Image: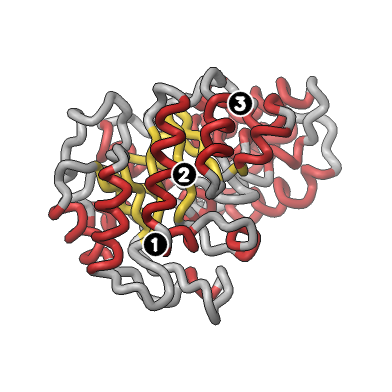
Amino acid sequence: MMTSIDQIDSIDRRLCVAPMMDWTDRHCRVFHRHLVPDALLFTEMVTAEAVIHGDLDRLLGHDEIEHPLVLQLGGSQPDRLAMAVERAADKGFSEINLNVGCPSDRVQSGRFGACLMAEPQLVADCCSAMMAASDLPVTVKCRIGIDDMDPEAGLDQFVDRVADAGVRIFYLHARKAWLKGLSPKENRDIPPLDYDRARRLAMRRDDLGVILNGGLETKAQIATEITGFAGVMLGRAAYRTPYVLTEIANDVFGATPPSRRQVAEAMADYADRMMANHVPLHSITRHMLGLYAGQRGAKHWRRQLGEQARLADDGGAFIRKVADQCEILAARLAA
């Protein structure tokens, strides 16, 4: 059973889709929204400096259908993060999240992401400055630890210090980030996930909302691990086998899952609208490759949307055509 965090704010965080660099752009989020109307979606991480100096329409623009939507920021300078929050505050986001979990070399070189777990007071100062800059909730996404940090005392000290600054929600990846000696790809499997450690934090700090993240892939797995947590956050599974989101949403919200064909149809309409604004079809379809994963016709769908979409100029009609072909293939294979 999930822990209730209704007393913290009105945002429903029982099912979240993780921020993923190069993946969860605005087209991906629209796709996910058609799969799960009630899940909490996140942007890709945007650096504070990009928000301060960049084109906000390009960086932060999104479709109304994406709401509720969280903006994830990267940075480690309280004043710069506060300035970024001020610029983003009126862009329609439900929440601002600070990235203290990503192990990528690109992130570490900018002194943000998981390496900040070694500096809990700095993270607390950053969050304080961000909260002072707007009325939006400020949350943190972090790991159970980094490198040689003690995952017991180290995680408790980090969360307690940041919570003292006023942060009430922590999206907790249950695997240590290993910043020395492992690539981010290797760190996806090493060291092992430790859901029990994450749960001990959630039970000890039951005044906070702790959302479990890391390695969650199926409805059955989530049903086993959810006890003590305020919600779950899916990452790679939401991208590679996205229809699993509908199965989880059925359990969490009691929502009737849309069919794969209904999702394809909705995305075809969206593609027509985007292509009228000169968005390449492949920028949209690249996020949809896993829609038919595990189904008859999945290979055809993936090949067509992954390869032929670059050549197609008929937008939504192309998506509808391939969906029709998948339905025909499935019927033939079932016969």
Task: Indicate the quadrant where residue 60 lies.
Answer: top right
Q: How is the image coloured?
A: secondary structure
Q: Which of marks 2 and 3 is nearer the N terminus?
A: 3
Q: Mark 2 points at which residue?
A: 98
Q: Which amino acid does label 2 sit on?
A: Leu
Tell me the distance, in whole angstroms, between the alpha carbons under discs 2 and 3.
19 Å
Mark yes or no: residue 114 visible.
yes
Q: Is residue 16 left or right of residue 309?
A: left
Q: Which amino acid does label 3 sit on?
A: His
Q: Mark 3 points at which residue?
A: 62
Determine the residue positioned at 62% across, 43% down.
Answer: 47
* Mark 2, secondary structure of its residue: strand
Determine the residue positioned at 77% across, 51% down.
Answer: 307
Residue 122 lies, in percent from the top left, at 43, 51
Q: Earlier in the sequence, mark 3 or mark 1?
A: 3
Q: Closer to the observer: label 3 or label 1?
A: 3
Q: Which amino acid does label 1 sit on?
A: Gly
Q: Is residue 62 left or right of residue 205?
A: right
Instruction: Identify the disc placed on residue 215.
Output: 1
Callout 3 environment at 10 Å: few (<14), some (14 to 19), or many (20+)? many
Callout 1 environment at 10 Å: few (<14), some (14 to 19), or many (20+)? many
Residue 145 lies, in percent from the top left, at 36, 66
Callout 2 environment at 10 Å: few (<14), some (14 to 19), or many (20+)? many
Residue 133 lies, in percent from the top left, at 47, 26
Q: In this view, does 242 lie to the left or right of 212?
A: right
Q: Closer to the observer: label 2 or label 1?
A: 2
Mark yes or no: residue 328 visible.
no
